Amino acid sequence: MISKKTIKAIEIAAVVARYSPGQPVPAHEISTLLGLSISYIEVTLSELKNHAIVRAYKGPGGGYQLDEKNRQITLWDIVKIFELPEATSRQSTQKISPLANMEREMRSRIQGFFESRSLSDLARQAKLPARQKTEVRSIFKLKPLPQRVAIRVVNSVFDWKMSTLA
């Protein structure tokens, strides 16, 4: 069936899809919304990035956005990243059983279900709070530079002579 990791990956992708039309969504914001650790989210987003589901932006104001590139992302695109290798390896090592045909039919129906659902539809249906506008802040607390004060000093004999005449 569908693993917990796959379900969490779909939830993470849905949050990114819901909030990413504007600014990129930082991992800590996803972590707060879903109650997952940042490291778990980063690993999952890395897999999604490797399969061209999301794009990553580094630096202040960075985060993740959907990488649609003129195509509709289905839930199956995400499920096959996390589920397909396990399913194919299990089928190749398993002997033919009386339930093999039923299992293939079930997998086919599950695949059809996820192929018929788009990530954008799921994101629209998700009941997520409105995104807070966050300003880009530096981790360094810098003070403004003081105004430069020009001190007039004598730096040559000619200037000294002129200053004594005045």
Image (cartoon, grey):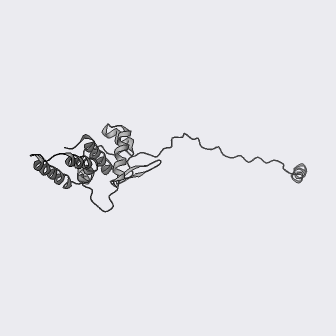
Q: Is residue 126 left or right of residue 133?
A: left
Rendered location of residue 165, percent (x, y): 90, 51
Extreme residue in the left direction: 98
Rendered location of residue 10, percent (x, y): 27, 47
Check the image and report above or below for 134 versus 120.
above
Residue at image location 11% in from the left, 50% down from the top: 101
Choose top left, top right, bottom left or bottom right for residue 132. top left
The number of discs equals 0
Q: Is residue 36 left or right of residue 136?
A: left
Extreme residue in the bottom direction: 70
Rendered location of residue 122, percent (x, y): 23, 50
Q: Is residue 107 left or right of residue 45?
A: left
For the N terminus, the quadrant is top left
Rendered location of residue 75, percent (x, y): 24, 52
